[in-house]
């Protein structure tokens, strides 16, 4: 059981590194054309749709199961305010890391949930690992581009992504051995993450994905959300 959990969470995390590799290839080996620009923005909106589906279908429902209204509202508002101040701080430094923050605030709580789920239903855990891995791929692709534009070298960004890919294993082990006995704490974490992610989506990610006189990018957000619906239905 433990080996299976580690392998599944490793897959879910590896797509963070894989998304960075694909973005690196796309940046350096695909010619700069209007079509490339449209693809980039499509993937940005696609990733935003997936992140939004994680909030609506995974993170918030988990919080609603174990928290009272006041507890849930507190965690959600706290997450929003914390990431508002983080975003303001990073904006003053001139960095573009909103997509990376949103990805991690989505990935880590879901990895913790993966560990807790595996203790109860391994088959559901397998589907959840696939769902998380599919989410991480476009999110990491976009986060890589943001970090390179912020001044990080391609090599340094890929090294960061390589080590971040192991967060899935650590989160799953934490959820499996520790937080599965504290469902309210896990619910607070999920709700806190939801507030922060939603703030980053509205403030940073969605505006960046918009292209004038182009409608395919908005379609990408809907398709991204559909991925979340399919994953939740399968789970």
Image (tube, rainbow, N blue to C red):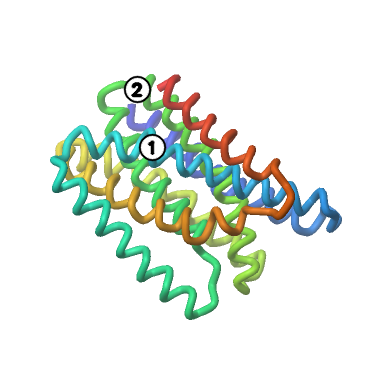
Residue 63 position in % (x across, y down): 24, 39
Q: Residue furthest front?
A: 213
Q: Depth check: 139 or 175 in front? A: 139
Q: Depth check: 20 or 33 in front? A: 33
Q: Residue furthest bottom?
A: 92
> Which disc, if any, is residue 74?
none
Is 228 located above or below residue 99 in the figure? above
Residue at the location (44% across, 32% down)?
A: 129
Q: Depth check: 111 or 141 in front? A: 141
Residue 65 position in % (x across, y down): 21, 32
Residue at the location (40% across, 29% down)?
A: 4
How far apart are the alpha carbons under marks 1 and 2? 23 Å
Residue 50 position in % (x across, y down): 51, 40
Is 80 located above or below residue 113 in the figure? below
- Mark 1 touching mark 2, by CB under 8 A? no
Element type at marker 2? helix
Mark 2 closeness class: few <14, some 14–19, many ≥20 residues within 10 Å: some
Q: Quadrant of the N terminus?
A: top left
Residue 132 position in % (x across, y down): 46, 37
Residue at the location (43% across, 53% down)?
A: 104
Q: Is 181 on the left-hand or right-hand side of 148?
A: left
Is 38 located above or below residue 146 in the figure? above
Check disc 2 and report the residue beneath it: 122
Element type at marker 1? helix
Q: Is 178 on the left-hand or right-hand side of 30?
A: left
Q: Earlier in the sequence, mark 1 or mark 2?
A: 1
Check disc 1 and report the residue beneath it: 56
Which of label 1 and label 2 is nearer to you? 1
Residue at the location (60% across, 62% down)?
A: 146
């Amino acid at each position: 059981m433990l080996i299976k959990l580690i392998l599944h969470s490793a897959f879910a995390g590896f797509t963070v590194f894989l998304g960075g590799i694909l973005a690196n290839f796309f940046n350096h080996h695909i010619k700069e054309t209007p079509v490339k620009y449209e693809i980039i923005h499509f993937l940005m909106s696609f990733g935003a749709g997936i992140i939004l589906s994680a909030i609506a279908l995974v993170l918030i429902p988990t919080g609603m199961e174990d928290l009272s209204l006041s507890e849930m509202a507190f965690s959600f508002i706290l997450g929003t305010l914390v990431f508002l101040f983080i975003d303001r701080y990073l904006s003053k430094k001139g960095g573009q890391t909103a997509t990376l923050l949103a990805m991690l605030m989505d990935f880590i709580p879901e990895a913790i949930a993966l560990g807790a789920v595996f203790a109860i239903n391994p088959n559901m855990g397998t589907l959840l690992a696939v769902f998380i891995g599919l989410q991480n791929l476009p999110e990491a692709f976009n986060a890589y581009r943001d970090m390179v534009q912020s001044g990080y070298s391609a090599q340094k960004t890929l090294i960061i992504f390589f080590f971040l890919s192991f967060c899935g294993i650590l989160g799953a082990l934490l959820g499996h051995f520790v937080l599965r006995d504290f469902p309210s704490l896990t619910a607070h974490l999920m709700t806190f993450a939801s507030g922060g992610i939603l703030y980053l989506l509205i403030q940073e990610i969605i505006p960046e994905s918009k292209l004038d006189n182009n409608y395919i990018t908005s379609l990408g957000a809907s398709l991204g959300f559909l991925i979340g619906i399919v994953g939740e239905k399968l789970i």
